[in-house]
Image (cartoon, helix red, strand yellow):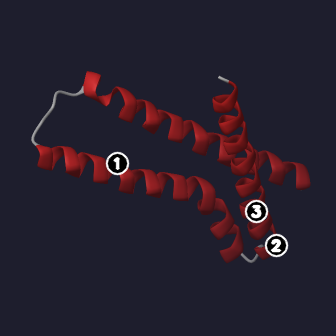
Amino acid sequence: MQNKLLASSFFNALFTVLYIALVAALMSYGHKIFSPGPEILTGIAVLSLFVLSALITGMLVLGKPIYLYWEGQKKEGVKLLICTTLWLVIFTCFIFIFLTLT
């Protein structure tokens, strides 16, 4: 059970980081992909992307732990959330270390 929990939390965090990378790439290269439009539409697009990103990352990080908690597997749900958070901390530290070294 522990190995399954660690693997699940690792992949939750990994997919979250990959999604963040995809959004960051879209924001970095968006001016090359999309033609400039009215400022109001640009604002709507950015805020919509922000809300959608919050939903997607929320589902990736919180979805399974909340489900487990509601199903009565409270310890497993909390452990999964903590492990996912720790993986995200590790991935974030690696990203900052990489940025520091380059």
Calculate the distance from the C-alpha at mark 1 to the C-alpha at mark 3: 27 Å
Q: Nearer the viewer, mark 1 or mark 2?
A: 1
Characterize the local packing of mark 1: few (<14), some (14-19) or many (20 or more) Cα atoms within 10 angstroms. some
Characterize the local packing of mark 3: few (<14), some (14-19) or many (20 or more) Cα atoms within 10 angstroms. some
User: SS of the residue at dot 1?
Assistant: helix
What residue is rendered at 74% in x and 77% in y? 72
Q: Is residue 56 left or right of residue 74?
A: left
Which of the numbered marks, if any, corresponds to residue 75?
Answer: 2
Calculate the distance from the C-alpha at mark 1 to the C-alpha at mark 2: 33 Å
The three-letter code of the residue at mark 2 reads: Lys
Calculate the distance from the C-alpha at mark 2 to the C-alpha at mark 3: 11 Å
Indicate the position of residue 11 as horizontal and vertical percent values.
70, 43
Disc with the residue nearer the chain's start (1 vs 2): 1
Disc with the residue nearer the chain's start (2 vs 3): 2
Residue for badge 3: 82
User: SS of the residue at dot 2?
Assistant: helix
Instruction: Indicate whether 33 appears above or below 62.
Output: above
What residue is rendered at 53% in x and 53% in y? 57
Residue extending furthest toward the left: 38
Residue for badge 1: 49
Instruction: Indicate whether 78 appears above or below 44.
Output: below
**Quadrant in the rendering for residue 91:** top right
**Quadrant in the rendering for residue 17:** top right
Residue extending furthest toward the right: 2
